[in-house]
Image (tube, rainbow, N blue to C red):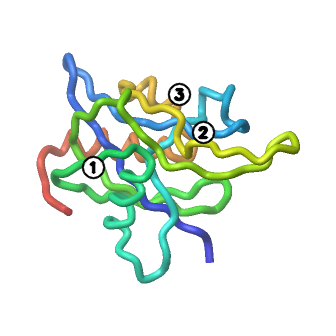
Amino acid sequence: MPRKSAGLLVYRHRAGATEVLLVHPGGPFWARKEEGAWSIPKGEFEDGEDALEAAKREFQEETGMTVAGTFHALAPVRQRSGKIVHAWAVEGDLDAQAIKSNTFTLEWSGKRREYPEVDRAAWFDIEEAKRKILEAQRGLLDQLQDCIARGPASDS
């Protein structure tokens, strides 16, 4: 059975454009990667666990923030690793500079060190986000655009 993650795609409207909040993974592997490296804040969840609640928890763990509002379910996407990502779009306006991520321990170049799961967050307009986000998650951005074009609907 494939692993699965749940996350939130937070968006806002600024100067006539829609922007999305993306996070950059921490640790040495991702340190110099930009294009195709960013992600929505997300994390794994277990069978039987409510996916939306897991998405909210993982968002808080990776950013140190919470977001409230109407959560619009997006169709899951499959990453190259086979992991299925379940996501919800929610409108919010958070300070990307104020994130505080949890950490993980990794041995790199013979040394065990602690790294933040997320080393930074930023707002991107949709077109720039499509260049920054992991390729498999681009479909979430397309779904967000469709959701916004359809107008308000509740599926929280």
Label 2 residue SS: loop
Q: Taking 69 as reference, is 130 above or below it?
A: above
Decide: few, some or many residues near mark 2? Use Cα within 10 Å; few <14, some 14-19, many ≥20. Answer: some
Q: Amino acid at mark 3?
A: Arg
Residue at coordinates 27% horizontally, 49% vertically from top-left? 66
Between the C-alphas of marks 3 and 1, the distance is 26 Å
Q: Secondary structure at mark 3?
A: helix
Outermost residue, right side: 110
Q: Do residues under tags 3 and 1 come within 8 Å of each other at their CB atoms? A: no
Residue 91: x and y, percent?
A: 21, 42
| Image coordinates for residue 3, horizontal then vertical, percent | 59, 69
Q: Is residue 57 above or below residue 148?
A: below
Q: CA distance from mark 2 to mark 1?
A: 20 Å
* Image quarter of the C terminus: bottom left
- Most extreme residue toward the top is 15
Q: Is residue 131 left or right of residue 53?
A: right
* Count of residue discs: 3
Label 3 Cα crowd, 10 Å radius (few <14 / some 14-19 / many 20+): some
Identify residue type, mark 1. Answer: Thr
Mark sitting on residue 66? 1
Q: Position of residue 70 (x, y in %)?
A: 17, 54
Q: Is residue 72 left or right of residue 113?
A: left
Disc sitting over residue 26 in the figure: 2
Please name which of the two marks, 3 or 1, marks the residue nearer to the observer: 1
Give the numbered dot on residue 131.
Answer: 3
Image position, residue 87 (x, y; %) = 38, 56
Tell me, for residue 138, which label it has, or none.
none
